[in-house]
């Protein structure tokens, strides 16, 4: 059953102002859903005077593309209601590529037609590819929609260049804000470097070629990769049956495990037991799962694609391999498994970088400043005396009071 987005957030205050966070409020929202949910979890339970409340605005639902039209229509009706009652301060639109682009364009256009200020938050790793394949008319529609937003939030320099140079958004209206994730909810199992324990490799994400899953399977199947005392766990949806067949064909199915869709608690348990997180993607923005690994103190092996290469430093915060370099991926994994001191260095420095740049309080404060500038109000963060927000590894109960305790664990696609 699809979670009720109105169950999330701070204590309801019907007389106060609120900000809609627009995205698919289901696992189909992927990283956008997780970012939005983390934000709403992190706001104050008891809202101070003058502060706004962050509320979810589901624009997709968990049904078919056709069924999503009704969800989108309902979302637009909520915009109208918020405008008429004068309580809706602004709309924060989280955007990706494909159909998400056109759904969010309609939200932006409706908001501006109603006189509502809009902040556009671009999460898409592949929008630049998608945009270039669009016919001229749809490209013009995309540029116009971006021009309507009061401000545009991007993940890094590459996204900023695309938005400014190809979509024509004035540079002064584009701001880089790196995502943040909560502190881990579970203590990490310390790696066993005695040479006796099982070494855990972890992949978290949608199982696809874009994520480099075939490359990963081929890398650990190489004769020069020592697979003794190794278990590789792949957590995520996608073409599970196809990759299981590939693992069998490679002769590695005895120690490669497919966990399937994993909820937040399950992913946290996997992360707490992992020796290495591996993400050999061909295209990314700035994946939350990497930030979550850094927060947990898990060393990361990944490709320097999207904003990863400009945010992390090879050999300091992560170990980089080039997309498609199967032999290089095998060597990198083997080297870190056999060199605990180097792995521990990545763990320490990655965790230090998380605390300096990717913490949830830092991300929340940065977004609050943007909301204050464009909406004239912003949400307040939880105080130390309030319950800590659920991390990616605990149940995402985002309601208040007894509703929080009863909220079911949500599944989340990790992009």
Image (cartoon, rainbow, N blue to C red):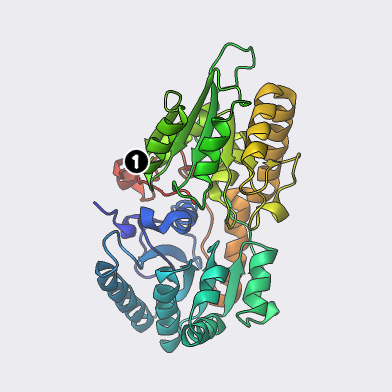
235, 221: nearer the viewer: 221
Q: Say if 161 sits above or below 390 in the image.
A: below
User: Where is residue 307 shown, x and y percent of the image?
Assistant: 65, 57
Q: Say if 186 sits above or below 283 in the image.
A: above
Where residue 14 sits, quadrant-wise, is: bottom left
274, 334: nearer the viewer: 334
Residue at disc 1, secondary structure: helix
Question: Is residue 282 in sight in this rendering?
Answer: yes
Question: Is residue 394 in sight in this rendering?
Answer: no
User: Where is residue 164 shown, x and y percent of the image?
Assistant: 66, 77
Where residue 26 sits, quadrant-wise, is: bottom left
How many numbered dots are placed on residues in this image? 1
Q: In this view, does 370 lie to the left or right of 273?
A: right
For label 1, count other residues whose C-alpha is less than 10 Å away and answer few (under 14), some (14-19) or many (20+).
few
Q: In this view, does 223 lie to the left or right of 36?
A: right
Q: Residue at x 63, y 83 (%)?
A: 168
User: Where is residue 371 shown, x and y percent of the image?
Assistant: 56, 70
Where residue 179 sits, quadrant-wise, is: bottom right
246, 258: nearer the viewer: 246
Q: Say if 58 sits above or below 410 in the image.
A: below
User: Where is residue 128 shown, x and y percent of the image?
Assistant: 57, 70
Pointer 1 residue: 241
Q: Which residue is drawn at 47% across and 46% down?
A: 205
Q: Say if 238 sits above or below 56 in the image.
A: above
13, 163: nearer the viewer: 163
């Amino acid at each position: 059953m699809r979670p009720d987005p109105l169950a999330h957030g701070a204590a309801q205050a019907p007389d106060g102002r609120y900000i809609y966070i627009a995205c698919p409020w289901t696992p189909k929202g992927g990283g956008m859903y997780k970012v939005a949910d983390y934000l709403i979890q992190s706001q104050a339970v008891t809202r101070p005077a003058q502060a706004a409340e962050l509320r979810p605005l589901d624009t997709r639902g968990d049904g078919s593309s056709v069924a999503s039209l009704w969800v989108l229509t309902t979302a637009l009706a909520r915009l109208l209601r918020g405008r008429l009652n004068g309580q809706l301060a602004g709309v924060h639109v989280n955007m990706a590529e494909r159909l998400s682009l056109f759904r969010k364009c309609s939200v932006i256009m409706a908001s501006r037609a109603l006189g509502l200020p809009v902040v556009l938050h671009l999460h898409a790793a592949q929008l630049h590819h998608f945009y270039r394949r669009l016919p001229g008319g749809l490209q013009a529609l995309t540029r116009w929609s971006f021009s309507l937003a009061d401000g545009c939030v991007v993940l890094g320099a590459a996204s900023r260049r695309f938005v400014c140079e190809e979509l024509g958004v004035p540079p002064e209206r584009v701001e880089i804000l790196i995502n943040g994730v909560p502190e881990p909810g579970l203590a990490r199992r310390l790696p066993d470097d005695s040479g006796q324990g099982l070494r855990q490799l972890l992949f978290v994400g949608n199982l696809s070629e874009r994520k480099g899953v075939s490359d990963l399977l081929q890398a650990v199947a190489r004769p020069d990769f020592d697979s003794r005392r190794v278990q590789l766990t792949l957590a995520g949806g996608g073409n599970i049956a196809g990759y299981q067949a590939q693992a069998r064909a490679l002769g590695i199915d005895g120690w490669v495990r497919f966990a399937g869709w994993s909820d937040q608690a399950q992913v946290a348990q996997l992360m707490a037991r992992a020796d290495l997180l591996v993400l050999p993607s061909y295209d990314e923005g700035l994946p939350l799962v990497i930030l979550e690994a850094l927060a947990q103190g898990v060393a990361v092996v990944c490709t320097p694609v999207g904003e990863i290469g400009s945010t992390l430093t090879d050999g300091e915060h992560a170990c980089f391999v080039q997309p498609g370099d199967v032999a290089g991926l095998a060597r990198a994994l083997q080297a870190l498994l056999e060199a605990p001191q180097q792995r521990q260095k990545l763990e320490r420095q990655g965790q230090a970088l998380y605390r300096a740049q990717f913490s949830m309080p830092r991300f929340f404060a940065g977004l609050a400043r943007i909301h204050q500038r464009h909406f004239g109000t912003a949400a307040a963060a939880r105080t130390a005396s309030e319950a800590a927000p659920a991390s990616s590894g605990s149940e995402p109960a985002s309601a208040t009071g007894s509703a929080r305790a009863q909220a079911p664990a949500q599944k989340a696609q990790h992009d």
